[in-house]
Amino acid sequence: MLVKVYGSAIHGVSAQTITIEVNVDTSGVGYHLVGLPDNAIKESSYRISAALKNVGYKIPGKKITINMAPADLRKEGSAYDLSIALGILAASEQIVAENIGDYIIMGELSLDGGLLPIKGVLPIAIKAREEGFKGIILPKQNIREAAIVNQLEVYGIENIKEVIDFFNAGVPLERTTIDTRKEFHEKINFFSTDFSEVKGQETAKRAMEVAAAGGHNIILIGPPGSGKTMLAKRVPSILPPLTLKEALETTKIHSVAGKIGTETSLMTVRPFRSPHHTISDVALVGGGSYPQPGEISLAHNGVLFLDEMPEFKRTVLEVMRQPLEDREVTISRAKFTVNYPASFMLVASMNPSPSGYFPDDPNNTSSQLEMQRYMNKLSGPLLDRIDIHIEVQKVEFNQLTDKRKGEKSEEIRARVLKAREIQSKRYQDSEIHYNAQMGPKEIEKHCELDEVSQGLIKTAMEKLNLSARAYDRILKVARTIADLELQENLNSAHISEAIQYRSLDREFWNV
Protein backbone atom coordinates (compact mmCIF):
# COMPACT_ATOMS: atom_id res chain seq x y z
CA MET A 1 0.00 0.00 0.00
CA LEU A 2 1.22 3.52 -0.84
CA VAL A 3 0.69 6.45 1.56
CA LYS A 4 1.75 10.09 1.20
CA VAL A 5 2.66 12.16 4.27
CA TYR A 6 3.71 15.80 4.11
CA GLY A 7 6.64 17.49 5.83
CA SER A 8 8.69 20.59 5.09
CA ALA A 9 12.31 21.59 4.40
CA ILE A 10 13.94 24.91 5.20
CA HIS A 11 15.73 26.80 2.41
CA GLY A 12 17.20 30.08 3.62
CA VAL A 13 14.40 31.65 5.67
CA SER A 14 11.53 30.06 3.74
CA ALA A 15 10.12 26.53 3.62
CA GLN A 16 9.41 24.02 0.87
CA THR A 17 6.84 21.24 1.21
CA ILE A 18 8.27 17.71 1.12
CA THR A 19 6.14 14.73 0.08
CA ILE A 20 7.12 11.57 1.95
CA GLU A 21 5.90 8.60 -0.08
CA VAL A 22 5.87 5.31 1.85
CA ASN A 23 5.27 2.05 -0.02
CA VAL A 24 5.01 -1.31 1.77
CA ASP A 25 4.77 -4.57 -0.20
CA THR A 26 5.27 -8.27 0.43
CA SER A 27 7.75 -8.96 -2.40
CA GLY A 28 10.69 -9.05 -0.01
CA VAL A 29 12.22 -7.62 3.15
CA GLY A 30 14.17 -4.39 3.39
CA TYR A 31 14.17 -0.70 4.31
CA HIS A 32 15.04 1.68 1.48
CA LEU A 33 15.15 5.44 2.07
CA VAL A 34 15.75 7.62 -1.02
CA GLY A 35 15.47 11.28 -2.01
CA LEU A 36 18.83 12.70 -0.87
CA PRO A 37 18.45 12.23 2.92
CA ASP A 38 21.38 13.16 5.16
CA ASN A 39 22.82 10.89 7.88
CA ALA A 40 20.37 12.11 10.55
CA ILE A 41 17.44 10.99 8.35
CA LYS A 42 19.13 7.70 7.43
CA GLU A 43 19.52 6.94 11.14
CA SER A 44 15.81 7.62 11.73
CA SER A 45 14.94 3.94 11.22
CA TYR A 46 16.56 3.07 14.56
CA ARG A 47 14.69 5.83 16.43
CA ILE A 48 11.40 4.98 14.71
CA SER A 49 11.76 1.23 15.41
CA ALA A 50 12.35 1.75 19.15
CA ALA A 51 9.65 4.45 19.45
CA LEU A 52 6.98 2.33 17.75
CA LYS A 53 7.86 -0.72 19.82
CA ASN A 54 7.51 1.29 23.04
CA VAL A 55 3.98 2.43 22.12
CA GLY A 56 2.76 -0.98 20.98
CA TYR A 57 3.49 -0.96 17.23
CA LYS A 58 6.36 -2.11 15.02
CA ILE A 59 8.10 -1.66 11.68
CA PRO A 60 6.76 -4.59 9.57
CA GLY A 61 9.16 -7.21 8.24
CA LYS A 62 8.35 -6.37 4.62
CA LYS A 63 9.88 -4.33 1.80
CA ILE A 64 9.55 -0.66 2.79
CA THR A 65 10.45 2.02 0.24
CA ILE A 66 10.41 5.64 1.35
CA ASN A 67 10.88 8.46 -1.17
CA MET A 68 11.30 12.08 -0.09
CA ALA A 69 10.19 14.26 -3.00
CA PRO A 70 11.42 16.40 -4.67
CA ALA A 71 14.19 13.81 -4.89
CA ASP A 72 16.86 16.28 -6.12
CA LEU A 73 16.62 18.52 -3.02
CA ARG A 74 18.85 17.55 -0.10
CA LYS A 75 16.91 16.84 3.13
CA GLU A 76 18.53 17.50 6.49
CA GLY A 77 17.90 16.87 10.16
CA SER A 78 15.82 14.61 12.36
CA ALA A 79 12.53 16.49 12.03
CA TYR A 80 11.07 13.91 9.60
CA ASP A 81 10.98 11.08 12.17
CA LEU A 82 7.29 11.55 13.03
CA SER A 83 6.08 11.83 9.43
CA ILE A 84 8.06 8.74 8.30
CA ALA A 85 6.83 6.72 11.30
CA LEU A 86 3.16 7.59 10.61
CA GLY A 87 3.65 6.84 6.92
CA ILE A 88 4.99 3.35 7.74
CA LEU A 89 2.06 2.62 10.10
CA ALA A 90 -0.52 3.79 7.55
CA ALA A 91 1.11 2.04 4.57
CA SER A 92 1.39 -1.24 6.51
CA GLU A 93 -2.30 -0.87 7.54
CA GLN A 94 -1.52 -0.95 11.26
CA ILE A 95 -3.57 2.25 11.53
CA VAL A 96 -6.27 3.93 9.42
CA ALA A 97 -5.32 7.49 8.51
CA GLU A 98 -7.56 8.65 5.67
CA ASN A 99 -7.01 12.37 6.26
CA ILE A 100 -3.27 12.25 6.98
CA GLY A 101 -2.62 14.27 3.79
CA ASP A 102 -4.48 17.28 5.22
CA TYR A 103 -1.66 18.05 7.66
CA ILE A 104 2.02 18.96 7.71
CA ILE A 105 3.55 16.58 10.27
CA MET A 106 7.01 17.21 11.74
CA GLY A 107 8.91 16.14 14.84
CA GLU A 108 11.96 14.29 16.13
CA LEU A 109 11.25 11.04 17.97
CA SER A 110 12.93 9.91 21.16
CA LEU A 111 13.19 6.16 21.81
CA ASP A 112 10.19 6.13 24.17
CA GLY A 113 7.93 7.73 21.55
CA GLY A 114 8.22 11.24 22.95
CA LEU A 115 8.68 14.27 20.70
CA LEU A 116 11.65 16.64 20.71
CA PRO A 117 11.51 20.24 19.37
CA ILE A 118 12.58 21.14 15.84
CA LYS A 119 13.92 24.26 14.06
CA GLY A 120 12.24 26.52 11.50
CA VAL A 121 8.64 26.06 12.66
CA LEU A 122 7.41 29.56 11.73
CA PRO A 123 8.35 29.43 8.01
CA ILE A 124 6.98 25.85 7.90
CA ALA A 125 3.63 27.01 9.29
CA ILE A 126 3.49 29.97 6.89
CA LYS A 127 4.13 27.65 3.93
CA ALA A 128 1.48 25.18 5.18
CA ARG A 129 -1.15 27.94 5.19
CA GLU A 130 -0.06 29.18 1.74
CA GLU A 131 -0.48 25.71 0.26
CA GLY A 132 -3.90 25.16 1.78
CA PHE A 133 -3.16 22.51 4.41
CA LYS A 134 -5.81 22.15 7.10
CA GLY A 135 -3.32 22.11 9.97
CA ILE A 136 0.11 21.31 11.30
CA ILE A 137 1.11 18.71 13.91
CA LEU A 138 4.29 19.46 15.87
CA PRO A 139 6.11 18.80 19.15
CA LYS A 140 4.43 20.66 22.03
CA GLN A 141 7.54 22.83 22.59
CA ASN A 142 7.06 24.45 19.15
CA ILE A 143 3.34 25.19 19.17
CA ARG A 144 3.44 28.82 20.34
CA GLU A 145 5.77 29.68 17.49
CA ALA A 146 3.51 28.01 14.88
CA ALA A 147 0.32 29.45 16.39
CA ILE A 148 1.37 32.94 15.25
CA VAL A 149 0.02 31.91 11.83
CA ASN A 150 -3.75 32.36 11.71
CA GLN A 151 -6.19 30.34 9.57
CA LEU A 152 -4.20 27.19 10.36
CA GLU A 153 -5.01 24.50 12.93
CA VAL A 154 -1.97 23.99 15.19
CA TYR A 155 -1.69 20.86 17.35
CA GLY A 156 1.11 20.21 19.82
CA ILE A 157 1.85 16.65 20.94
CA GLU A 158 4.10 15.06 23.53
CA ASN A 159 4.05 11.45 22.30
CA ILE A 160 3.51 9.71 18.95
CA LYS A 161 0.65 7.71 20.53
CA GLU A 162 -1.44 10.92 20.61
CA VAL A 163 -1.18 11.34 16.82
CA ILE A 164 -1.85 7.65 16.18
CA ASP A 165 -5.03 7.87 18.26
CA PHE A 166 -6.02 11.11 16.50
CA PHE A 167 -5.93 9.50 13.03
CA ASN A 168 -6.83 5.91 13.95
CA ALA A 169 -9.49 6.39 16.63
CA GLY A 170 -10.60 9.99 16.15
CA VAL A 171 -9.36 11.07 19.61
CA PRO A 172 -9.23 14.87 19.35
CA LEU A 173 -6.01 16.83 19.84
CA GLU A 174 -5.94 20.13 21.73
CA ARG A 175 -5.71 23.04 19.31
CA THR A 176 -3.50 26.01 20.20
CA THR A 177 -4.51 29.56 19.26
CA ILE A 178 -2.77 32.86 20.01
CA ASP A 179 -3.98 36.43 19.61
CA THR A 180 -0.81 37.58 17.86
CA ARG A 181 -1.59 41.29 17.80
CA LYS A 182 -2.58 41.39 21.46
CA GLU A 183 0.56 39.55 22.58
CA PHE A 184 2.72 41.70 20.29
CA HIS A 185 1.41 45.00 21.68
CA GLU A 186 1.59 43.82 25.30
CA LYS A 187 5.34 43.16 25.15
CA ILE A 188 6.52 45.70 22.59
CA ASN A 189 7.85 48.22 25.13
CA PHE A 190 9.52 45.85 27.59
CA PHE A 191 13.24 46.61 28.18
CA SER A 192 15.49 45.46 31.01
CA THR A 193 17.93 48.39 30.60
CA ASP A 194 17.53 52.17 30.43
CA PHE A 195 19.70 55.16 29.49
CA SER A 196 18.85 56.82 32.81
CA GLU A 197 21.26 54.33 34.43
CA VAL A 198 24.24 55.77 32.52
CA LYS A 199 26.18 58.37 34.52
CA GLY A 200 27.63 61.28 32.55
CA GLN A 201 28.60 60.64 28.90
CA GLU A 202 26.20 63.26 27.54
CA THR A 203 28.14 63.59 24.26
CA ALA A 204 28.07 59.83 23.71
CA LYS A 205 24.34 59.71 24.53
CA ARG A 206 23.71 62.42 21.95
CA ALA A 207 25.67 60.44 19.34
CA MET A 208 23.65 57.33 20.20
CA GLU A 209 20.42 59.29 19.75
CA VAL A 210 21.54 60.53 16.31
CA ALA A 211 22.60 57.00 15.33
CA ALA A 212 19.24 55.53 16.41
CA ALA A 213 17.25 58.30 14.69
CA GLY A 214 18.88 57.69 11.31
CA GLY A 215 19.81 54.00 11.58
CA HIS A 216 23.51 54.91 11.41
CA ASN A 217 26.40 52.60 12.29
CA ILE A 218 28.49 53.89 15.21
CA ILE A 219 31.84 53.11 16.85
CA LEU A 220 32.70 54.12 20.43
CA ILE A 221 36.37 54.82 21.21
CA GLY A 222 37.44 55.07 24.84
CA PRO A 223 39.45 53.60 27.72
CA PRO A 224 38.37 50.52 29.72
CA GLY A 225 35.49 51.17 32.13
CA SER A 226 34.27 54.33 30.43
CA GLY A 227 30.84 52.81 29.71
CA LYS A 228 31.08 51.78 26.04
CA THR A 229 29.39 48.41 26.53
CA MET A 230 26.80 49.90 28.90
CA LEU A 231 25.83 52.48 26.27
CA ALA A 232 25.68 49.90 23.48
CA LYS A 233 23.39 47.55 25.42
CA ARG A 234 20.85 50.33 25.82
CA VAL A 235 20.55 51.18 22.12
CA PRO A 236 17.53 48.87 21.52
CA SER A 237 15.61 50.80 24.20
CA ILE A 238 15.69 54.00 22.10
CA LEU A 239 15.10 52.44 18.68
CA PRO A 240 11.59 52.61 17.20
CA PRO A 241 9.44 49.59 18.20
CA LEU A 242 9.23 46.71 15.76
CA THR A 243 6.32 46.72 13.36
CA LEU A 244 4.34 43.47 13.14
CA LYS A 245 5.93 42.79 9.73
CA GLU A 246 9.46 43.32 11.12
CA ALA A 247 8.64 41.12 14.11
CA LEU A 248 7.59 38.28 11.78
CA GLU A 249 10.75 38.68 9.67
CA THR A 250 12.95 38.61 12.76
CA THR A 251 11.13 35.66 14.31
CA LYS A 252 11.49 33.64 11.07
CA ILE A 253 15.28 34.01 11.12
CA HIS A 254 15.56 33.06 14.79
CA SER A 255 13.19 30.15 14.18
CA VAL A 256 15.40 28.77 11.38
CA ALA A 257 18.43 29.08 13.68
CA GLY A 258 16.59 27.35 16.54
CA LYS A 259 16.85 30.39 18.82
CA ILE A 260 13.18 30.71 19.78
CA GLY A 261 12.32 29.74 23.37
CA THR A 262 9.44 27.39 24.16
CA GLU A 263 7.53 30.19 25.93
CA THR A 264 8.06 32.66 23.07
CA SER A 265 5.75 33.02 20.10
CA LEU A 266 6.67 36.32 18.43
CA MET A 267 9.79 38.41 19.00
CA THR A 268 8.59 41.82 20.15
CA VAL A 269 11.90 43.57 20.98
CA ARG A 270 14.65 44.36 18.49
CA PRO A 271 17.44 41.76 18.75
CA PHE A 272 20.79 42.64 20.32
CA ARG A 273 23.61 40.31 19.26
CA SER A 274 27.07 40.51 20.81
CA PRO A 275 29.38 37.81 19.39
CA HIS A 276 32.76 37.07 21.00
CA HIS A 277 35.86 38.32 19.18
CA THR A 278 36.99 34.73 18.47
CA ILE A 279 34.01 34.21 16.11
CA SER A 280 34.73 32.81 12.63
CA ASP A 281 33.68 34.54 9.42
CA VAL A 282 31.12 31.76 8.68
CA ALA A 283 29.56 32.12 12.14
CA LEU A 284 29.32 35.90 11.64
CA VAL A 285 27.84 36.09 8.13
CA GLY A 286 26.27 32.63 7.90
CA GLY A 287 26.96 29.57 5.78
CA GLY A 288 28.50 26.19 6.48
CA SER A 289 28.02 22.89 4.66
CA TYR A 290 24.35 23.06 5.68
CA PRO A 291 23.83 26.85 5.55
CA GLN A 292 22.54 28.55 8.68
CA PRO A 293 22.01 32.28 9.34
CA GLY A 294 24.97 33.99 11.01
CA GLU A 295 25.09 36.66 13.71
CA ILE A 296 24.51 39.50 11.22
CA SER A 297 21.22 37.88 10.15
CA LEU A 298 20.21 37.15 13.75
CA ALA A 299 20.71 40.91 14.31
CA HIS A 300 18.33 41.73 11.42
CA ASN A 301 16.06 44.67 12.39
CA GLY A 302 18.18 45.13 15.52
CA VAL A 303 21.70 45.78 16.77
CA LEU A 304 24.98 43.94 16.15
CA PHE A 305 27.49 44.89 18.85
CA LEU A 306 31.19 44.15 18.23
CA ASP A 307 32.96 44.75 21.54
CA GLU A 308 36.72 45.51 21.19
CA MET A 309 36.46 45.53 17.40
CA PRO A 310 40.24 45.44 16.65
CA GLU A 311 40.45 42.11 18.51
CA PHE A 312 38.29 40.46 15.84
CA LYS A 313 40.21 38.76 13.02
CA ARG A 314 40.61 41.10 10.07
CA THR A 315 39.12 38.53 7.67
CA VAL A 316 36.00 38.35 9.87
CA LEU A 317 35.54 42.12 9.81
CA GLU A 318 36.12 42.41 6.06
CA VAL A 319 33.34 39.95 5.20
CA MET A 320 30.88 42.45 6.71
CA ARG A 321 31.59 45.05 4.03
CA GLN A 322 29.06 43.80 1.47
CA PRO A 323 26.24 43.09 3.99
CA LEU A 324 26.67 46.58 5.47
CA GLU A 325 26.02 48.09 2.04
CA ASP A 326 23.44 45.66 0.61
CA ARG A 327 21.67 44.78 3.89
CA GLU A 328 21.54 41.11 2.92
CA VAL A 329 24.08 38.30 2.66
CA THR A 330 24.26 35.74 -0.13
CA ILE A 331 25.64 32.26 0.57
CA SER A 332 26.61 30.55 -2.69
CA ARG A 333 27.33 26.86 -3.11
CA ALA A 334 27.82 24.71 -6.22
CA LYS A 335 24.20 23.52 -6.31
CA PHE A 336 22.26 26.34 -4.62
CA THR A 337 22.28 29.92 -3.41
CA VAL A 338 20.71 31.15 -0.16
CA ASN A 339 19.91 34.76 0.74
CA TYR A 340 19.61 35.86 4.37
CA PRO A 341 18.40 39.37 5.31
CA ALA A 342 20.95 41.40 7.28
CA SER A 343 19.59 44.91 7.83
CA PHE A 344 21.16 45.75 11.18
CA MET A 345 22.60 48.70 13.03
CA LEU A 346 26.30 48.13 13.75
CA VAL A 347 27.52 49.35 17.14
CA ALA A 348 31.23 48.74 17.75
CA SER A 349 33.63 49.68 20.51
CA MET A 350 37.40 49.87 20.77
CA ASN A 351 40.23 51.20 22.92
CA PRO A 352 42.28 54.09 21.49
CA SER A 353 45.52 52.09 21.91
CA PRO A 354 46.72 48.57 22.87
CA SER A 355 47.21 49.74 26.46
CA GLY A 356 43.61 50.98 26.46
CA TYR A 357 44.22 54.72 26.90
CA PHE A 358 44.44 57.89 24.83
CA PRO A 359 48.00 59.11 24.04
CA ASP A 360 47.73 62.08 26.42
CA ASP A 361 46.69 59.85 29.35
CA PRO A 362 49.47 59.20 31.93
CA ASN A 363 48.42 55.52 32.01
CA ASN A 364 49.20 55.06 28.31
CA THR A 365 52.26 52.84 27.73
CA SER A 366 51.87 52.21 24.00
CA SER A 367 54.37 53.60 21.51
CA GLN A 368 53.27 55.41 18.36
CA LEU A 369 54.23 52.33 16.30
CA GLU A 370 52.14 50.03 18.52
CA MET A 371 49.16 52.37 18.26
CA GLN A 372 49.54 52.50 14.47
CA ARG A 373 49.67 48.71 14.25
CA TYR A 374 46.60 48.49 16.50
CA MET A 375 44.60 50.97 14.39
CA ASN A 376 45.61 49.23 11.16
CA LYS A 377 43.56 46.20 12.23
CA LEU A 378 40.56 48.20 11.02
CA SER A 379 40.65 48.88 7.28
CA GLY A 380 39.75 52.26 5.82
CA PRO A 381 36.89 50.88 3.69
CA LEU A 382 35.30 49.31 6.77
CA LEU A 383 35.59 52.49 8.84
CA ASP A 384 34.09 54.46 5.93
CA ARG A 385 30.97 52.33 6.33
CA ILE A 386 30.61 53.45 9.96
CA ASP A 387 28.85 56.82 9.93
CA ILE A 388 29.61 57.98 13.48
CA HIS A 389 32.91 57.75 15.39
CA ILE A 390 32.63 59.10 18.95
CA GLU A 391 35.15 59.35 21.78
CA VAL A 392 33.96 58.17 25.20
CA GLN A 393 35.98 59.76 28.01
CA LYS A 394 36.31 58.21 31.47
CA VAL A 395 33.60 59.21 33.94
CA GLU A 396 34.64 61.61 36.70
CA PHE A 397 34.02 60.78 40.38
CA ASN A 398 31.46 63.55 40.92
CA GLN A 399 29.41 62.21 37.97
CA LEU A 400 29.52 58.66 39.31
CA THR A 401 28.30 59.72 42.75
CA ASP A 402 25.60 62.07 41.43
CA LYS A 403 22.23 60.80 42.72
CA ARG A 404 20.23 62.47 39.96
CA LYS A 405 18.89 60.17 37.28
CA GLY A 406 19.74 60.85 33.66
CA GLU A 407 17.25 61.21 30.83
CA LYS A 408 15.10 58.09 30.40
CA SER A 409 15.20 55.95 27.27
CA GLU A 410 11.49 56.65 26.84
CA GLU A 411 12.15 60.39 26.40
CA ILE A 412 15.01 59.84 23.94
CA ARG A 413 12.90 57.33 22.05
CA ALA A 414 10.10 59.86 21.63
CA ARG A 415 12.50 62.22 19.78
CA VAL A 416 13.86 59.34 17.72
CA LEU A 417 10.31 58.36 16.72
CA LYS A 418 9.52 61.90 15.57
CA ALA A 419 12.66 61.93 13.41
CA ARG A 420 11.79 58.49 11.96
CA GLU A 421 8.25 59.68 11.14
CA ILE A 422 9.72 62.57 9.14
CA GLN A 423 11.95 60.10 7.27
CA SER A 424 9.05 57.72 6.60
CA LYS A 425 7.07 60.52 4.95
CA ARG A 426 10.13 61.68 3.00
CA TYR A 427 10.83 58.21 1.58
CA GLN A 428 7.25 56.94 1.30
CA ASP A 429 7.56 56.55 -2.49
CA SER A 430 10.88 54.69 -2.37
CA GLU A 431 12.22 51.41 -0.99
CA ILE A 432 14.28 53.03 1.77
CA HIS A 433 12.99 53.81 5.26
CA TYR A 434 15.60 55.94 7.06
CA ASN A 435 18.53 58.25 6.34
CA ALA A 436 21.32 55.68 6.62
CA GLN A 437 19.85 53.88 3.58
CA MET A 438 20.03 56.93 1.31
CA GLY A 439 21.77 56.49 -2.03
CA PRO A 440 23.43 59.17 -4.21
CA LYS A 441 20.07 60.28 -5.71
CA GLU A 442 18.44 60.76 -2.29
CA ILE A 443 21.51 62.55 -0.90
CA GLU A 444 21.48 64.97 -3.83
CA LYS A 445 17.76 65.60 -3.41
CA HIS A 446 17.46 65.85 0.39
CA CYS A 447 20.87 67.17 1.49
CA GLU A 448 21.21 70.48 -0.30
CA LEU A 449 23.86 72.76 1.25
CA ASP A 450 24.03 76.53 1.54
CA GLU A 451 27.26 78.37 0.76
CA VAL A 452 28.55 78.40 4.37
CA SER A 453 27.91 74.68 4.80
CA GLN A 454 29.65 73.90 1.49
CA GLY A 455 32.73 75.84 2.59
CA LEU A 456 32.75 74.03 5.94
CA ILE A 457 32.57 70.55 4.45
CA LYS A 458 35.15 71.44 1.77
CA THR A 459 37.64 72.46 4.47
CA ALA A 460 36.97 69.24 6.38
CA MET A 461 37.46 67.12 3.26
CA GLU A 462 40.81 68.76 2.50
CA LYS A 463 42.20 68.78 6.06
CA LEU A 464 41.05 65.28 7.01
CA ASN A 465 41.64 63.76 3.55
CA LEU A 466 38.15 62.23 3.61
CA SER A 467 36.92 59.76 0.98
CA ALA A 468 33.82 60.26 -1.15
CA ARG A 469 32.03 57.68 1.01
CA ALA A 470 32.93 59.61 4.18
CA TYR A 471 31.52 62.76 2.52
CA ASP A 472 28.22 60.96 1.92
CA ARG A 473 28.18 59.71 5.52
CA ILE A 474 28.62 63.25 6.86
CA LEU A 475 25.66 64.46 4.78
CA LYS A 476 23.48 61.54 5.94
CA VAL A 477 24.28 62.20 9.60
CA ALA A 478 23.68 65.93 9.13
CA ARG A 479 20.29 65.14 7.59
CA THR A 480 19.41 63.08 10.70
CA ILE A 481 20.52 65.88 13.05
CA ALA A 482 18.26 68.29 11.15
CA ASP A 483 15.37 65.81 11.41
CA LEU A 484 15.86 65.55 15.19
CA GLU A 485 15.58 69.36 15.34
CA LEU A 486 12.51 69.19 13.06
CA GLN A 487 14.21 71.39 10.45
CA GLU A 488 13.61 71.07 6.73
CA ASN A 489 16.96 72.45 5.50
CA LEU A 490 20.54 71.63 6.49
CA ASN A 491 22.67 74.39 7.95
CA SER A 492 26.29 74.80 9.07
CA ALA A 493 25.50 73.70 12.67
CA HIS A 494 24.23 70.33 11.41
CA ILE A 495 27.28 69.86 9.15
CA SER A 496 29.64 70.92 11.94
CA GLU A 497 28.19 68.38 14.40
CA ALA A 498 28.30 65.63 11.76
CA ILE A 499 31.99 66.36 11.07
CA GLN A 500 32.68 66.08 14.81
CA TYR A 501 31.42 62.49 14.58
CA ARG A 502 34.41 61.46 12.41
CA SER A 503 36.95 61.04 15.26
CA LEU A 504 38.94 58.31 13.54
CA ASP A 505 39.49 60.56 10.53
CA ARG A 506 40.83 63.51 12.51
CA GLU A 507 42.65 62.32 15.65
CA PHE A 508 46.43 62.40 15.83
CA TRP A 509 46.56 58.90 17.29
CA ASN A 510 45.45 57.58 13.90
CA VAL A 511 48.28 59.27 11.95
Image (cartoon, rainbow, N blue to C red):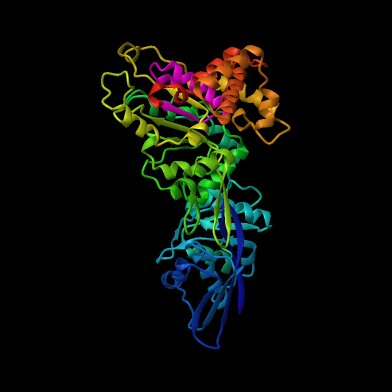
Q: Is residue 272 magenta?
A: no
Q: Position of residue 4 (x, y in %)?
A: 62, 70
Q: Can residue 154 be seen in this view?
A: no
Q: Is residue 67 placed above or below 322 in the rendered structure?
A: below
Residue at x-position 58% and y-position 15%: 456
Q: Position of residue 14 (x, y in %)?
A: 60, 53
What's the magenta region? Answer: 195-221
Q: Does the magenta stretch include residue 204?
A: yes
Q: Nearer the viewer, residue 203 or 168?
A: 203
**The quarter of the displayed image where residue 447 is located:** top right
Tally the numbered discs.
0
Q: Where is residue 480 in the image (x, y as percent from the top left)?
A: 59, 22
Q: Is residue 139 placed above or below 453 in the rendered structure?
A: below
Q: Is residue 343 visible?
A: yes
In this rendering, position of residue 303 left or right of residue 354: right
**The quarter of the displayed image where residue 202 is located:** top left
In this rendering, position of residue 129 left or right of residue 386: right
